[in-house]
Image (cartoon, grey):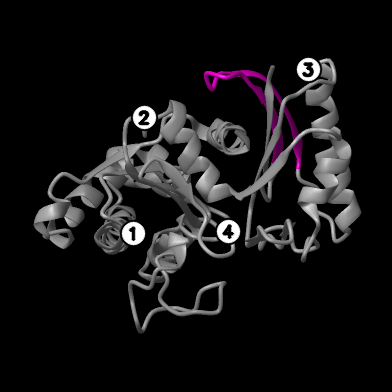
């Protein structure tokens, strides 16, 4: 019997049917409505679930949910920063009502991405893993000793808000100098523009990568700065959690050597403790399917 994995983000809602080996056998997607009405967003989630249930003839063994956060595992509610109308939204109960009679498990999208890569992606075989997404923001999740680590509330692994510059810019979280303010795609673009670049409004990591691949000096410097900030954060998290692998996905990771070469070079300088000598940083393999797979694995 198949497991239903649901992945809810600010731009896309996806529901997949996953078999016991972690293979995705069906996927339905709907855009996340740009709405101020919570029920309109829920209607899109419900429609995506209904598509997947039709493909499964209405029968699944369990449901796992990967949601943008913050999440509250005790109450089953979510308050995604990128879905502003969902503040304390009872997502777990709504999904349970839509798929009655089976267990439903909620997790943050970061830990589900990490768990998906650990199960069938680039993290196979790792014991202590950090999974990261570098895109319009920087997200993450932890798999420690082979087990997803949720933390006290379900929000462990929010590595985008590790402080890497005590006097840095204000972050969307309200703090200052978070790695997200330096290494997210829009942050790197802002840095390039502030230093004399001509990146167009709305440009992101892909456009910056195209400029860097063409030899643009400011774009290359922006990538080096973002990579250095990521390396500082990774070194800190690795020292705390004794990691053996970091898997990096998202649009930023699609820039390939433009990000990974300076990231690995900076990490070699920051992570100097003997027990971190074997730490590896690799690209993710599953792309946008990692969250659904991890959610299904979380559901058991």
**First in sequence: mark 4 or mark 1?**
4
Determine which quarter of the picture holds residue 73.
Answer: bottom right
Disc 3 + disc 4, Cβ < 8 Å: no
Image quarter of the N terminus: top right
Disc 4 + disc 2, Cβ < 8 Å: no
Cα distance, mark 3 to mark 1? Answer: 43 Å
Q: Which residue is mark 4?
A: 154
**Could you tell me residue 2's position as x and y percent?**
68, 20
On residue 226, the disc is 1
Please tell me whether residue 23 belongs to the stretch shown in magenta.
Answer: yes
Does residue 19 appear left or right of residue 241 in this picture?
right
Secondary structure of the residue carrying numbered label 3: loop
Determine which quarter of the picture holds residue 22.
Answer: top right
**Could you tell me residue 41's position as x and y percent?**
83, 49
**Could you tell me residue 37's position as x and y percent?**
89, 58
Q: Which residue is mark 3?
A: 56
Cα distance, mark 3 to mark 4? Answer: 29 Å
On residue 124, the disc is 2
Q: Which residues are magenta?
A: 13-31
State which mark lies toward you, 4 or 1.
4
**Could you tell me residue 208's position as x and y percent?**
41, 49
Label 3 Cα crowd, 10 Å radius (few <14 / some 14-19 / many 20+): some
Does residue 4 appear left or right of residue 97 in this picture?
left
Label 2 Cα crowd, 10 Å radius (few <14 / some 14-19 / many 20+): some
């Amino acid at each position: 019997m198949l497991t239903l994995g649901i992945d809810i983000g600010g731009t896309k809602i996806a529901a997949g049917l996953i078999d016991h080996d972690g293979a995705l056998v069906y996927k339905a997607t709907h855009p996340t409505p740009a709405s101020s009405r919570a029920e309109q967003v829920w209607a899109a989630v419900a429609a995506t679930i209904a598509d997947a249930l039709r493909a499964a003839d209405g029968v699944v063994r369990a449901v796992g949910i990967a949601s943008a956060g913050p999440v509250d595992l005790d109450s089953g509610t979510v308050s995604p920063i990128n879905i502003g109308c969902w503040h304390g939204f009872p997502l777990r109960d709504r999904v349970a009502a839509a798929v009655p009679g089976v267990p439903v498990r909620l997790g943050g999208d970061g830990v589900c991405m990490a768990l998906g890569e650990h199960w069938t992606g680039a993290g196979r075989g790792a014991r202590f893993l950090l999974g990261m997404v570098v895109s319009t923001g920087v997200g993450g999740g932890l798999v420690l000793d082979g087990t997803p680590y949720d933390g006290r509330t379900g929000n462990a692994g929010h590595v985008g808000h590790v402080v890497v510059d005590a006097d840095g810019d204000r972050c969307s979280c309200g703090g200052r100098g978070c790695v997200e303010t330096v290494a997210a795609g829009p942050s790197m673009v802002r840095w390039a523009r502030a230093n004399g670049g001509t990146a167009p409004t709305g440009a992101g990591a892909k456009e910056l990568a195209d400029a860097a691949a063409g030899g643009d000096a400011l774009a290359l410097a922006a990538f080096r700065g973002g990579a250095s900030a990521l390396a500082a954060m990774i070194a800190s998290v690795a020292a705390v959690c004794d990691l053996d692998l970091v898997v990096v996905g998202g649009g930023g990771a699609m820039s390939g050597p433009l990000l990974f070469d300076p990231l690995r070079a900076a990490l070699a300088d920051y992570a100097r403790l003997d027990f971190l000598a074997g730490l590896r940083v690799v690209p993710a393999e599953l792309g946008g399917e990692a969250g659904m797979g991890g959610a299904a694995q979380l559901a058991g």
